[in-house]
Amino acid sequence: MHPAGGTCKETEQAALQSYCQMARTLIVLLLVAVAALAADFRLYLKDGNYHLVREYQVEGDRVRFYSVERSEWEEIPVSLADLKRTEAERQERQEDTQKRAAEIAAEEKFAREQREERERIPVEPGVYFVEGKQMKTLKLAESRAVSKKSRTVLQRVVPIPVVAGKTTVELEGEHSANIMTSARPEFYMRLDHDEDFGIVKMMPKKGVRVVQEWAVEPVVKQVIEKEQDIPIFRKQVDDGVYQIWPREPLEPGEYAVIEYTPGARNVETWDFACQPAK
């Protein structure tokens, strides 16, 4: 189980803030180092040699430059300097420096967005979704295992007995109260232990929505689960935390995010209806 409570949250936030500050400091130092390297450049001579300089000025028939090696101003005849090569290389270095600075900034932006994404997800196991700028909780539904002989509320800690024949996992009512207006809704799942999970389309049945069908082999007592899986993308955001969303836009209808252990008869269901805005 993941820890919960104000103290743990405050500790996590303090650690993240400290990490963010260290990351920002490192980025600043890297940018300063890149800028410093770009400040000095080669003033080429026509014989192939060069002076390492901070800057230079052309004054009549003389080139006056600040020597990095000797830390003083010097000058040479302009006829000895290869200014074309000097400026070409200098321009190339400036472009490389700008490119590297942009890459560093983009890496820092991506890292910051990843940290912010992790911070938004509550520490309690469950399913969450973003609405506007808010992270909201998708309520865990009460599901029942229904067979010809019984109707039992599903519980993770006490799986129902194996009964030969066909059993359906159902939710009351034909429509979910949780409405998603996006055809490709995105969810965050925080697991409390390693399990299978995904998005399924509910199977139609009068008065209820069917999440799974269980076929139980009478001799070996093996449970074969059947559901209408929706192909999804999944991205691990943190330890035990995943972001999932459909590979293709969902058609209007009834769906659910599910979490379960294959063959263990312990499916948990977070239902929603897809009603894309027109």
Image (cartoon, helix red, strand yellow):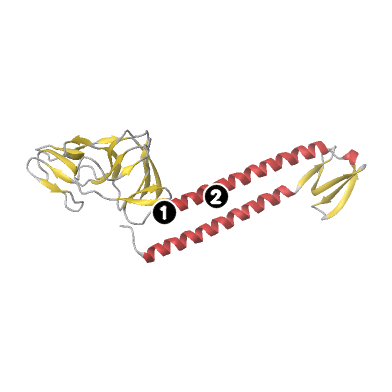
Q: Residue at x 75, y 41 (%)?
A: 90
Task: State the residue position of label 1.
Answer: 120
Q: Earlier in the sequence, mark 2 or mark 1?
A: 2
Question: x and y percent of residue 181 in the render?
Answer: 36, 40
Question: x and y percent of residue 109 in the render?
Answer: 54, 48
Element type at marker 1? helix
Is 248 on the left-hand or right-hand side of 96? left
- Tell me the tag on residue 269: none
Quick check: can you spot residue 187? yes
Quick check: can you spot residue 160? no
Q: Note whether 133 is above or below 273 in the view shown.
A: below
Question: x and y percent of residue 64 in the render?
Answer: 87, 48
Distance from Cα at disc 2 to Cα at disc 1: 18 Å
Question: x and y percent of residue 5 in the render?
Answer: 34, 64
Task: State the residue position of label 2.
Answer: 108
From the viewer's side, name the closer residue of 150 and 2.
Answer: 150
From the viewer's side, name the closer residue of 182 and 145.
Answer: 182
Q: What's under tag 2, amino acid-wise?
A: Glu
* Quadrant hosting residue 224: top left
Q: Residue at x 90, y 38 (%)?
A: 79
* Quarter of the C terminus within the rendering: top left
Element type at marker 2? helix
* Quarter of the N terminus within the rendering: bottom left
